[in-house]
Amino acid sequence: MSKRYTITAALPYTNGPIHIGHLAGVYVPADIYARFKRLTGNDVAFICGSDEHGVPITIKAKKEGVTPQDIVDKYHAIIKTSFEDFGITFDNYSRTSAQIHHDTASEFFKTLYDKHEFVEEVTEQLYDEEANQFLADRFVTGTCPKCGNEEAYGDQCENCGSSLNATDLINPKSAITGNVPTLKETKHWFLPLNKHENFLREWILNGHKKDWKPNVYGQVKSWIDDGLRPRAVTRDLDWGIPVPVPGGEGKVLYVWFDAPIGYISATKEWAAKEGKDWEPYWKDKDTKLVHFIGKDNIVFHCIIFPSMLKAEGSYILPDNVPANEFLNLEGNKLSTSKNWAVWLPDYLNDFPNQQDVLRYALTANAPESKDNDFTWKDFQARNNNELVAIFGNFINRVVVLTNKYYDGIVPEASEFSEVDTETLAAVKAYPSVIESSIERYRFREASQELMNLARLGNKYLADEEPWKLVKTDEDRTKTIMFVALQIASALATLSEPFLPFTSEKLKRILDTNANTWADISTKDILLPSHHQIGKGELLFSKIEDKTIQEQLDKLEASKKANEAANKEVEPQKETITFDDFTKLDMRVGTILEAEKMPKTKKLLILKVDTGIDTRTIVSGIAESFTPEEVVGKQVTVLVNLAPRALRGVESEGMILMTETPEGKLVFVNPDTTVNSGLQIS
């Protein structure tokens, strides 16, 4: 029975092109799901669009000396074209600068405002005196209070995924001037998430959401168990949707209030073009709403947006939010600022007509339950050893032999042997097997089941050896080729969600587009006798070592260029007085014990003899040193720094370190061994 699905993919920021991390985390799995749902006869609205508001846009504009509108116009066009060329089948790809979105978001805000769903508060926010601007979100950086990452933003830590407020940051710094900000009072509207805590607990924790992916359910449970607090839904900025109520002058809607409403406005825009009614896709309880996102967006889609929808009162809630983890690149975290990425426009240029190779490599290595690593060598191996050697090899043999023996006409089968019957029965089972994996959002598993069907075809041909029997048993050879062509036809249909360009090409070779997903498991014959197929052509081509080396060289060149660009010496900080300096109590300490903080990448818990006492210091050096390497080292310790809790451990000081031009952390310590507690002055 068909069903209505509203499928959303996270709105990409229009401050740069799409890269493979975005594709693996969100857009490829979302497209597989949407294509599958259409193939199985469902009513699908697959929705996305450019997220054109928020601080990253304005920061990019300032750097390039252009307006925010210039930035979003440029990257919206690049992103939209890249998605189309890559074969992502959005029913509508919209943008949040569209008038329909401004109207929809403003109306949504006013509805909640009129229902008294907001709390209006005057609070102290970070302010850059030199820039004469409040520092919201990405306008401020600092140390994450939860994991110790020193490059956290004022809205989120990309290391641990925590959602933050700018005032939560330790040692905050303006991203505009580099200055230490002050605090200044300002009025904002807040969504009281604490008011919705019981609803969220009942809906997610006590409801039927335990089928959500463990990373999603676990993060949401942690948030709810920790107690929810009001979240600001407005910002002191001049780029965005103006706050549409009295007192909102000079303020805009917070991008994370505005952006998810973009799914709704994009659906409205699509429905108007198609002559449809948009409301059933968002307000009919029989519609299944699914959000595809990355793990850094879990809190917004599972707590904040559902609270907004619940407060408004007329919308359905998401049935599932299958968030993926992060994809790394060649062992290092993808970084747009460091240009450590494989950009989609570059891939499409360097690998023309090979969209499916990247789709397959990203799906087969998808970061579904943990962070995974993309390497060019694995990409090459997936193509050469699986797509070429298994899938492509089977199809090529079937098509070439059919043309050689029967001029491309599907032969008539005679009596089926036991192996023929078993093989055809196995083919019929694959749709339900693949479907089961897709319905559980296990796209990596589903892609391997598709490849197993191609393996079945190769094994069948290798075992039956029609190229030998053709000289001695013509009837048996015809039967073998008939069965092999049924497998090829099944592959043409079942590969469509995963390898859409390949599926289209294979259907063209077989000259058939007649079979649905359900036909594979119900029809005895997919490609009838006497049907004329086309000539053979390669589905995939081998990728040579030289091509892969070129990509590795490109990454290395990018890395060196970034290092060169960042070799500038940091400018002198704000002048301090001698009295300020004398307040710093720096002493030589000896590290007595060290251990890795659980569930973190960067943090070590150190026991340090300062000469005054033995104290605990949490230091973000775990990626540069093992616990064993630092025990016994003498270090410079700032001992009179106010204690700060990091991941539940109170840190009572700071180890002073520096970084070499190559990015390596080194201790600032004495040249010779001295007594712990020696003051540095």
Image (cartoon, rainbow, N blue to C red):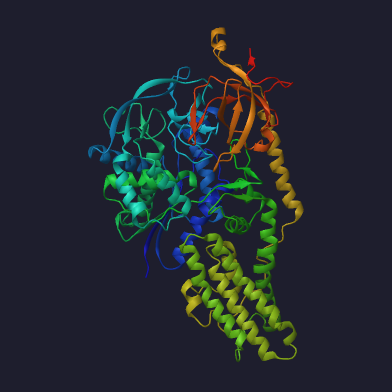
Quarter of the rendering occupied by the C terminus: top right
Quarter of the rendering occupied by the N terminus: bottom left
Q: Residue 632 location, x and y as percent? A: 68, 30
Q: Nearer the viewer, residue 503 or 81?
A: 503
Residue at screen point 66% across, 35% down: 624
Q: Is residue 650 above or below residue 680?
A: below
Q: Residue furthest right?
A: 546
The reply, left or right, for residue 550 in relation to residue 276 is right
Residue 356 falls in which quadrant of the image? bottom right
Q: Is residue 661 above or below residue 32?
A: above
Q: Is residue 386 visible?
A: yes
Q: Residue furthest top?
A: 578
Residue 386 falls in which quadrant of the image? bottom right
The reply, left or right, for residue 28 in relation to residue 230 is right
Query: How many callouts does the rendering have?
Result: 0
Q: Is residue 261 visible?
A: no
Q: Is residue 155 above or below residue 376?
A: above
Residue at screen point 57% across, 12% down: 581
Q: Residue furthest left?
A: 115
Q: Is residue 144 above or below residue 538?
A: above
Q: Nearer the viewer, residue 11 or 424?
A: 424
Q: Residue 310 location, x and y as percent? A: 29, 47
The reply, left or right, for residue 54 in relation to residue 567 is left
Q: Residue 208 location, x and y as percent? A: 36, 58
Q: Residue 303 location, x and y as percent? A: 37, 45
Residue at screen point 65% across, 84% down: 480
